[in-house]
Image (cartoon, rainbow, N blue to C red):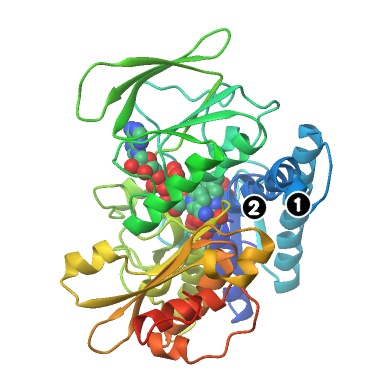
Amino acid sequence: MSDTEFDLVVIGGGPGGYVAAIRAAQLGMKTACVEMRGALGGTCLNVGCIPSKALLQSSELFEEANHSFDGHGIEVTPKLNLKNMMGRKQKIIDDFTKGIEFLFKKNKVTYVKGRGQIKAVGQVEVTEGEDKGKTLTAKKILIATGSESTPIPNIDVDEKKIVSSTGALELDKVPGHLVVIGGGVIGLELGSVWRRLGAKVTVVEFLDRILPTMDGEVSKTFQRVLKKQGMGFKLKSKVTEAKATKTGVKLKVEPAAGGDAEEMDADVVLVCVGRRPYVDGLGLEELGVKRNERGFIEIGEDFQTNVEGIYAIGDCVPGPMLAHKAEDEGIVCAEKMAGQQPHINYGAIPGVVYTMPEVADVGLSEEALKEKGIDYKVGKFPFLANSRAKANGFPDGFVKLLSDAKTDKLLGAHIIGPAAGEMIHELTTIIEFGGSSEDVARTCHAHPTFSEAVREAAMAIHDGPIHA
Ligand code: FAD
Ligand code: NAI
């Protein structure tokens, strides 16, 4: 094969694309990955998961130093150095992007720099960037071009005063008042970052609760905890206008059901009302690749689109827009291309909101079980009664487990509390293995750990927990 002939060309170097490229190469396919950003790692590494988690960690330490250390008998007067905090975040990103380049070299994946366009089945042209003009031929093409922030009509994002998540990760000073449009994952994570660093934060949410797809009880408790921390909420409301002025932003907010508009002033407005698939300039219309009514690329079980030889994974196809879902699809797609028969259990993909407390879930919510008419049992245990949570000073939240009323099979797990994002994996494994709540209740858990709350919630489904 020549330098430009490949078994597989992947377009997009995010968690879906780069992981698929590495797995394909490991399985013996000659693979190239085309990425236009100038760095590998996609949204997740460059402007998503990793920078947001770096800032969440830094701002949580600042918050604890300001408000919790004295409770431990430690007296400090913390001072924010935002430039250094941002520098730390950037260093983490740079180290990881270099790391992926190293992994490409190690696995002999060719990194092509620029925008890829599918000219025909089996042919990708680089239309912009360092490798502009190159034409690659491929037996198979995998689209992993990800997603972008969904705009709100008539609200212009300038990434300075009216920002998407990308701008909100880059602010050079703490805004006096940050208005967040959308009480979803991005709004609550990045709203938490800036509130901890000193901003007044108001979240405007269209629906009657934050995180509307999560279990209702969790979302209510979460809102109460965030309110106690100082975050403001305007539910059942919509922003109809946001205009940048010399000094800040003027907004008009209306009740979602219609009614009189109220004016609001902000220093910065964060628009985060969801994300949409990004497929600009790929040439999908010309090729006849089918997309659904929301613009996601339609795929079959083997990730192939309606056009033979063209596949798609990650945020640009239907399903949760999560990095680990994209990665799983990348691995499974490459393995299927190599003739193996792996599968993904879409019912066992955990979701985590990395606030403090964290919120994590896997499987079905109580609302979803009711809607499906499934008989279930509920077991709950509060962190207030968990010795480790008390000792560490994190008493907010609970573990809630939902199991089939007849078979006891675990159907859903919902945690709001410290380290929820780590604890959820025990329950993800149980769901993946088709286990029961009794399996969890009868498994020895080390003492004292937060995870004991998981076991006690499982015991609550049966004869009752010991410590509540
Ligand atoms: P992407 O990561 O979007 O990668 C696609 C890549 O394709 C991009 O780098 C893009 O430049 C490139 N590309 C697009 N078109 C072309 C083209 N024509 N030619 C060449 N290259 C192209 N998920 C989690 O699971 N956990 C989190 O904590 C989390 N935090 C997030 C925080 C924020 C602020 C945001 C915005 C998202 C977060 N996500 C998180 C979601 C996560 O980032 C995405 O689900 C994930 O990145 C999707 O991976 P992907 O590979 O499908 O697409
Ligand atoms: P989201 O879908 O999580 O939340 C958007 C919110 O905006 C919803 O609550 C919705 O009801 C509300 N909304 C929609 N239109 C509105 C309007 N006009 N006015 C007011 N509210 C409105 O979307 P978000 O937060 O933008 O995040 C996008 C995606 O990125 C997430 O769905 C998730 O897949 C991913 N992500 C994941 C993270 C994680 O796993 N920790 C962190 C950040 C993002």
Which residue ends up furthest to the left in the rendered image? 373
- The answer to whether any part of residue 446 appears in the image is yes
Label number found at residue 50 = 2
In this view of the protein, which residue sits in the foreground, 270 or 122? 270
Residue drawn 61% across and 65% down? 389
Disc 1, disc 2: CB below 8 Å?
Answer: yes
- The label shown at residue 92 is 1
- Residue farthest toward the top in the current orientation of the protein: 246
Quadrant housing residue 19: bottom right
- Camera-side residue: 347 or 23? 347
What kind of residue is marked 2? Ile
Q: Residue at coordinates 55% horizontally, 78% vertically from top-left?
A: 452
Residue 107 location, x and y as percent? 70, 73
Picture coordinates of residue 103 (x, y %)? 72, 67
Residue 43 pos. (x, y %):
57, 49
Is 230 located above or below residue 133 in the figure? above
Q: Secondary structure at mark 1?
A: helix
At label 1, the amino acid type is Ile
* The N terminus - image quarter: bottom right
Alpha-carbon span between mark 1 and mark 2:
8 Å
Q: Secondary structure at mark 2?
A: helix
Count of numbered labels shown in the rendering: 2
Residue at position x 81%, y 33% from top? 79
Answer with mark 1 or mark 2, whichever residue precedes in sequence: 2
Query: Ligand 2 lies in which image quarter?
Result: top left
Image point 31% across, 36% down: which residue?
A: 206
Q: Is residue 430 above or below residue 259?
A: below
